[in-house]
Image (cartoon, rainbow, N blue to C red):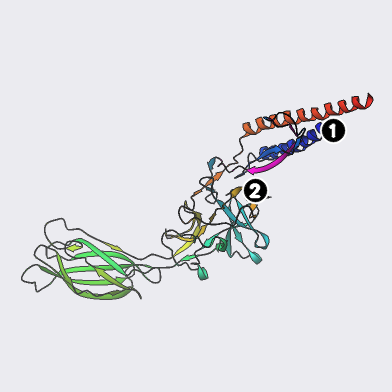
Amino acid sequence: MLQSIYSGISGLQSFQTGIDVLSNNIANVNTVGFKGSSTEFSNLFEKTVSAAGNPVTSAQTGLGVQVNAITLDMKTGSYYQTDSKTDLAIVGNDGWFGLSGPNDQEYFTRAGNFRFDPYSPDGITTDTRLVNPEGFFVTGTLANNTNGGILSPVVGSMELDPANASAQQPLIFPNALIFPVQPTTQANFTGNIGIEDLPQVISAVAISPQSERNSLRLVFTQSAEQPPSGIRWDVTATAQTADGSVVYDTQSGVVDFDASGAIVSSTLGPIDNNGAPVTANFGTGFGGLISNSGSSVTSSATVDGTLAGELLGYSVNRNGDITSSFSNGKQSVVGKVAIYHFQNDQGLEAVGGNKFRVSDNSGNPLFYAQNNGEILSSTLETSNVKLDTALTELIILQRSYDAVSKTITTGDEMLKNALQM
């Protein structure tokens, strides 16, 4: 009879733990990125009642129940879109964001409700940092291309080094950043200047080292001396301010075309655009500038180069790249949000605040060499707790708790009756 009381007490303790776990799940049904847990039970001990008996079956009785494990449910929650470009969600159930807390303590989370937080020591804003609601820094890889407030543009996407998952750092960027001017170095001219003996003018906008939109003006006039075959044009190129008030350089040359109108040669040299030499490229054959009567007389020019730009803000794309946007319409990658993986996600140690940290059971964080993960921006992952399922399980545990408490009451009554006999 006493054993029924002991078994009942173990049931009360175990089912209370199960109810505690379910209560926490239900309480976090609206918590961003929350991962619910489930309680697993097992019998406590087995006692042999009699060594002799039926050789086919054992003569044993159980001695109660225990909590065998509380497992983390890694199913993915639902996704919903937001208006913030710094709200992030990891696609699928494999992967974690990294956080750096006080004393550089490392944490991991599925909650991607991040924001850029300007850092202002002494009231002077110098940096902006990607942080979670608690102010912990989001970690990843820095491009290290923002020295002195001047950007060194990065083309394309950054890649995480699979061997350096432990070498990530807080994602901190300058609050003020300049996209440097890239002066025009080449102007490409295309079209047909015809064969009539009339001046032809082609103009292009050339970016100067001072980030000015200067005018590159080419005037074609037919040469006094023409070749035996084809046509020859004298060309004068002028680099000047947009309003023509200042002329920086003037160069002259000769351009020859064959009888079909394809370009043969050009002697026009580079034109100085206020400190930046610009090469006039007329192409080859029919792949650039031509001179014939076979098509309408039209021409155009394209140039390289970029004006300087001021930082407008930062955003995150599906690759996890943090991209800086500038007033000149340009963008450049300045960092990458890391997605960490573990050999045993359920071995992570929960520390509150929807955060986890490494344990001996989880193993150290790592990156995948291939398909490390995909991030959704302006998106958050909801809790993976299903309220209807959790309430059903709660009712079952409640009934189990009531039933096992009844075994204690019954055992106690039987013990009283035995003592009164």
Residue 222 x %, y % = 13, 69
Q: Residues within 10 Å of mark 1 (few under 14, many from 20)?
A: few
What SS does tag 1 mark? helix
Which of the pair 368/302 is nearer the observer? 368
- Report which quarter residue 5 is drawn in: top right
Q: Is residue 381 above or below residue 124?
A: above
Which of the pair 205/324 is nearer the observer? 324
Q: Is residue 242 visible?
A: no
**Residue type for callout 1:** Leu
- Residue furthest out toward the right: 420
Q: Is residue 12 visible?
A: yes
Residue 68: in magenta span: yes
Question: In percent of the image, x 31 and y 67: which residue is there?
Answer: 215
Q: Which residues are magenta?
A: 57-77
Question: In percent of the image, x 16 and y 71: which residue is there?
Answer: 265
Q: State which tag comes first along the sequence, 1 or 2.
A: 1
Residue 124: in magenta span: no
Which disc, if any, is residue 354?
Answer: 2
Residue 393 x %, y % = 66, 32
Question: In percent of the image, x 47 and y 53: which residue is there?
Answer: 319
Q: Which residue is mark 1?
A: 2
Q: Residues within 10 Å of mark 2 (few under 14, many from 20)?
A: some
What SS does tag 2 mark? loop
**Residue type for callout 2:** Asn
